[in-house]
Image (spheres, rainbow, N blue to C red):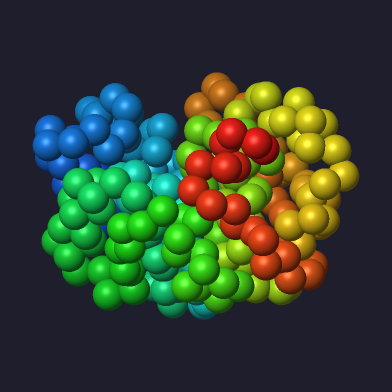
Amino acid sequence: METIVSEVNENEDQLRNFVRLLVAANELARLTGPSDEETLWNSHVMDCASALPLLPYEGKIIDVGTGGGLPGLVWAVCRPGLHITLLDSITRKCALVEKIAIAMGLKNVIVVCKRSEEYAKEKREKFHVAAARAVCASGILAEYLAPFVRIKGKAIAFKGPKVTAEIEIVGNKWRTLGFSSPRLRPYTLGEMKRFFLIWDKVSQTPKGIPRRAGMAEKFP
């Protein structure tokens, strides 16, 4: 926790600027839920910062389904040695997030507007970490993230209290993606109990993964 507070304090001016830019962008497209500055700071910026102890200080990271640049832009500010790809399939969101990154002067970020299934074919096993805050079942998220992660890398998903049930549904099928069985790391956000769901990449993801667009949701 001390590391998180220290890194946020060291970068607070730039992170507060990000929040202001996000508020303005939310008037043009719905990048997040509630968009007042206090909520964005407490519920989004601090949530993203909670994962900093799980990250390296250097390396390549992909934020899958970045939406408003969360968690990727928070991580890019706090860890300038990381090279972060912000991936989303919605053109308008990508354009706004790219403008935010430029306005913040971030040189360690690129924005890619493609479906994850498509982009994974181009960047197969190229990243040290793949992450997602998307509201999506754990088994589906794992299929989206696994193709991006290099062996000995890891994937991180931000999850709520239903995560244990989601893991039980998948059973022991994680190895079919090249992942280890997941481990949970609990943390608190305000009064809410949250979890990081973490997979280690232990073998190559089979060539048939990712399946074509939409298949992960239809047939998890």
Name the one closer to the observer, 135 or 38.
135
Answer above or below: position of 108 versus 210: below
Image check: 89 left or right of 166? Answer: left
> How many marks do you count on the picture?
0
Q: Which residue corresponds to the image point at 40% horizontal and 65% vertical from the top-left?
A: 85
Name the one closer to the observer, 64 or 213.
213
> Is residue 159 shown to the viewer in this render?
no
> Is residue 217 shown to the viewer in this render?
yes
Specify the quadrant that holds the C terminus.
Answer: top right
Residue 185 x, y percent position in the rendering: 71, 43
Residue 9 x, y percent position in the rendering: 38, 54
Given the current orientation, which residue lies at the most extreme right position? 172
Residue 182 x, y percent position in the rendering: 77, 48
Q: Which residue corresponds to the image point at 29% horizontal and 46% vertical from the top-left?
A: 90
Answer above or below: position of 124 versus 55: below
Report which quarter residue 154 is drawn in: bottom right
Image check: 205 left or right of 1? Answer: right
Name the one closer to the observer, 6 or 37.
37
Residue 25 x, y percent position in the rendering: 16, 42
Q: Which residue corresponds to the image point at 82% horizontal and 31% vertical from the top-left?
A: 168
Q: Which residue corresponds to the image point at 65% horizontal and 36% vertical from the top-left?
A: 219
Image check: 13 left or right of 154? Answer: left
Image check: 9 left or right of 182? Answer: left
